Image (tube, rainbow, N blue to C red):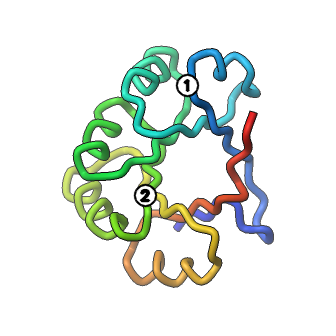
Amino acid sequence: MKLIGHPSIAYEPLYRIHSQEDIAKSPSNTILVFEGDLALAAYCQSQKILFALHVKNIKELVLANALGANYFIVDKSLAINAQKVADDYLFDGKVMLYSTDESDIEFVALNAIDGIIFESSIKSL
């Protein structure tokens, strides 16, 4: 299980972006995070930029995988179904629960979710 943003574990911060212009402002070799903007995801894929897509449903999850997302950030209500789809179709990216609560580590572990991204790990530009 991958833990990103836990205060006891070293991690590289992720950077929230909203546009291609934000990419130029972000530190190089970092993972960019954004909402389900498929055009921005396609741009990142074409430029070989690592990115995490916050997906709201299974359709967005499948599209994010096709576009090469490294992480699929999901809310708790989607996590179990998203992980099942990712496992069944052997997605390369990891399903990551978005959380502010350390007790969600147990939920992630018991439901075999790939990992957890704590809100504090995502920086704004």
Find the residue positioned furthest to the left: 88
Closer to us: 49 or 15: 15
Q: Residue at x 44, y 63 (%)?
A: 75
Q: Which residue in the protein does label 2 denote?
A: 74
Left or right, 10 with respect to 65, comes to right
Q: Measured along the vertical axis of the image, is residue 123 above or below residue 42?
A: below
Q: Which residue in the protein does label 1 denote?
A: 49
Q: Where residue 5 sits in the image (x, y, percent)?
A: 70, 60
Closer to us: 124 or 94: 124
Mark 1 and mark 2 lie on one chain; the one further toward the N terminus is 1
Q: Where residue 78 sits in the image (x, y, percent)?
A: 33, 64
Q: Residue at x 68, y 38 (%)?
A: 15
Amino acid on which disc 1 is placed: Ile
Left or right, 84 with respect to 37, comes to left
Left or right, 37 with respect to 90, comes to right
| Mark 1 vs mark 2, CA separation in Å | 20 Å
Left or right, 8 with respect to 86, comes to right
Indicate the secondary structure of the residue bearing disc 2: strand
Q: Where residue 69 sits in the image (x, y, percent)?
A: 43, 37
Q: Residues within 10 Å of mark 2 (few under 14, many from 20)?
A: many
Viewer-nearest of labels 1 and 2? 2
Q: Quarter of the image holding residue 23?
A: top right
